[in-house]
Image (spheres, helix red, strand yellow):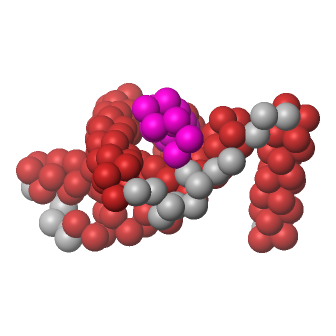
Amino acid sequence: MTKGILDHAFEEGQVSISVVGRVIVVAGLILGSLHFGVERGLSVLELPELWQRQLNLGFFLFLIWLAVNGGIRAVNKLLPGIAVGWLFITGIGIGAWGQAIFSLAQWAFFRYNGEETFPFLFYLLPGLLPSLAVSLLVAVLTAITLRVENSLMAFLLRLLIFGALALLIYLWI
């Protein structure tokens, strides 16, 4: 039986928020740092631009899956029986914080090297929505894996999500 997001006692709610906040901060810091390191490393390799963008996207998707999945599993392990809404909040928080750290590192890198003097929001806003969307997708898939006990039902839910996503992409293009 799952609890509502706000159905915790005061002390339990404080502990939940504290653990969730710590996991978000640590996993987001790791995600943003690794993403920045991968992007800088790929730019040093001087690959063709198309390959560089595709590799960067692939590494970004892998890193966000790793960070969000690991963060949600950590929260679920540290607070057994926590509401599913908190797991979604954890996933979205990791994606948002990771993007903020990545953007801050980019802004500081270019400012320090004197290459560009754009404001911080120039780096943050373009990647924020894709980061939130992917982290929410990973959070939902991880929550299904952790909370749905029937493996057939979990498979069908994942299939439904990927089918709806494929339909949206097909209709958009």
Place of residue 167 in the rendered image (x, y in percent of width and height, measured from the top left): 86, 62
**Left or right of 154: which side holds 58?**
left
Q: At 30% across and 38% down in the image, what residue appears? A: 26
Res. 156 visible in picture: yes
**Left or right of 138: which side holds 45?**
left
Residue 115 vs residue 33, the one in the foreground: 33
What span is colored magenta in the figure? 64-82
**Count of numbered circles in the view:** 0
Q: Quadrant of residue 71?
A: top left
Residue 147 vs residue 120, the one in the foreground: 147
Q: At 28% across and 70% down in the image, what residue appears? A: 121
Res. 28 visible in picture: no
- Does 111 appear in magenta? no
**Left or right of 162: which side holds 84?**
left
Place of residue 93 in the rendered image (x, y in percent of width and height, measured from the top left): 41, 54
Q: At 8% across and 50% down in the image, what residue appears? A: 112
Place of residue 116 in the rendered image (x, y in percent of width and height, measured from the top left): 18, 61
- The secondary structure making up most of the magenta span is helix
Residue 27 vs residue 125, the one in the foreground: 27
